[in-house]
Image (cartoon, rainbow, N blue to C red):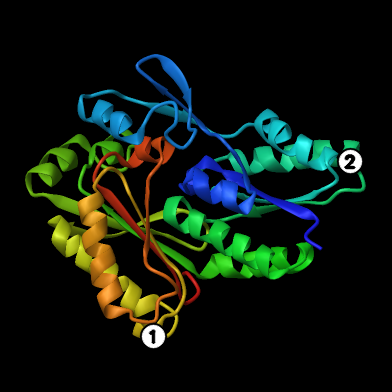
Amino acid sequence: MNEYTITCGSTADLPYEFYKENNIKYGCFHFELDGIDYIDDLGKTMPYEKFYKKLDEGAIPSTSQLTQSDYINLWKPILKEGNNIIDIGLSSGITGGFNSALLAKDELLKEFPDRKIAVIDSIGATAGYGMLVSYAADKKKEGMNFEQLVDYLEELKTHIHLWFYSTDLTGYLRGGRISKTSHIFGTMLKICPVMNVNIEGKLIPRDKIRGKNKAKRLLFEKMVEHAQNGKNYDGKCFISHSDCYDDALELKELIENEFPKLKDKVFITMISSVIGAHCHKGTVCLSFVGDKRD
């Protein structure tokens, strides 16, 4: 009997239909734009296209993580219904929200001592985070119990790769990752930083590629290098993008042509406003299951 509910954050970048179909509850991160506070509610309040257009026009957003109160408000109704909780959170290497979840867990278990709450650090974001949630939903449907699923996810997360590139360096400048000079010359030379998320869930610069087509090719080559069974890989593949669907589609077509045994078609999703506030328009992320991350 599946006596638990899976929860996650909006930064898993999955569509509303997925959450509804799989009975997964999600907590909304927050962002501020033009002096107005918004919840990152899967593009309902502010459509993603409008959000990225505002960034193009020079708007400077700020973001905030899920708080302890947010987690309590998300989880308490579930516990009252008699269900346990498996929460999958945005990487602790990116946000402090994981600690907020742990604090909420401690507080709620005092009120509901007979319930169980597992808080899993996805060590991922966007497509990689969403893929972990997707696998969790599959295994729940297959009948995995609470403890089995927790153990499964703790192992699987170390094998989910997330590689990405960006064509807009604005987010890197504002985040202090590059200097103003590097931003100017990088933009002039069309430099696309290629990064991945390591085993600690931190963003690691891996290469600087001139031109998005070469960067796109490098992401594909990383999948060939790291995917389980190479081009015989038969797992899932997720791509997320920040308002550059054509680039995501080109990568999808390349992968589907070269990986004939994929589980379903490559899944393309939009990068949410909170993640997009940091990477800006023109980012493409690729996620798959592979060897253990370094």
Vertical arrangement, residue 74 with respect to residue 146, above or below: above
Q: What kind of residue is marked 1? A: Asn
x and y percent of residue 90 in the render?
Answer: 54, 47
SS at mark 2?
Answer: loop
Residue found 29% across the figure and 34% down from its top: 49
Q: Classify residue 97 by image quadrant.
A: top right
Q: Are marks 2 and 1 in contact (CB under 8 Å)?
A: no
Is residue 166 left or right of 236 when viewed as pictured?
Answer: left
x and y percent of residue 22 in the render?
Answer: 61, 53
x and y percent of residue 37 in the render?
Answer: 46, 19
Is residue 260 left or right of 98 when viewed as pictured?
Answer: left
SS at mark 1?
Answer: helix
* 10 Å crowding of disc 2: few (<14), some (14-19), many (20+): some
Q: Which residue is mark 1?
A: 232
Is residue 271 left or right of 80 when viewed as pictured?
Answer: left
Vertical arrangement, residue 201 with respect to residue 263, above or below: above
Q: Which residue is mark 2?
A: 112
